[in-house]
Image (tube, rainbow, N blue to C red):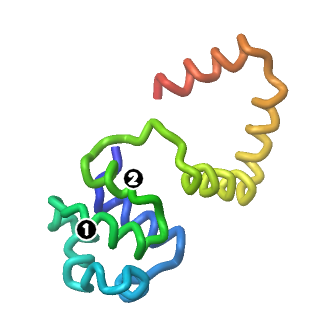
Amino acid sequence: MESLSEYVQRIMKEKNLKVPDVVRRSNGGIGETYLTSIVKGEATNLTVEKIKALALGLGVDEVEVCYAACGVESKEWTPRTLLTTMDKIVASPELTEILKALMRAKSAKLKAVKKLLERD
């Protein structure tokens, strides 16, 4: 399970964002000091307004930030998470080949692969 701090750090790394970038993109909704405390894992109880500002600054869905802030793993695909996942698949030859193989696999094989992955 990814903490809010880890989530924010990952998104910033994936999007090549620095703290001032996120602050600027939040349209004044979140300050540099507060964002830094989130990144360091020091600020944990965000208000709804701060979650919205953080999502805007990171360019992600508010629900994703809310899940991370609550320590809940999202079970739903949002349009943004789907697009992010597709980008990762396209950027990775290994993931592309795995997906192609899964698309050709029969139902029983898919169930076996799912069961194998759930053990980890």
Q: Secondary structure at mark 2?
A: helix
Label 1: few (<14), some or many (≥20) within 10 Å?
few
Q: Does residue 101 appear to the left or right of 20 in the view shown?
A: right
Question: Could you tell me which residue is drawn at 47 percent across and 79 percent down?
Answer: 17
Q: Secondary structure at mark 1?
A: helix
Q: Disc 1 marks which residue?
A: 49
Q: Residue furthest right?
A: 104
Label 2: few (<14), some or many (≥20) within 10 Å?
some
Q: Disc 2 marks which residue?
A: 63
Question: Could you tell me which residue is drawn at 25 percent across and 78 percent down?
Answer: 36
Q: Are marks 2 and 1 in contact (CB under 8 Å)?
A: no
Q: Quadrant of residue 42?
A: bottom left
Residue 119 point in image, percent of width and height = 47, 23
Q: Amino acid at mark 2?
A: Val
> Eyeballing the image, is 61 above or below 75?
below
Q: Residue furthest top?
A: 108
Q: Quadrant of residue 100?
A: top right
> Eyeballing the image, is 104 above or below 41?
above
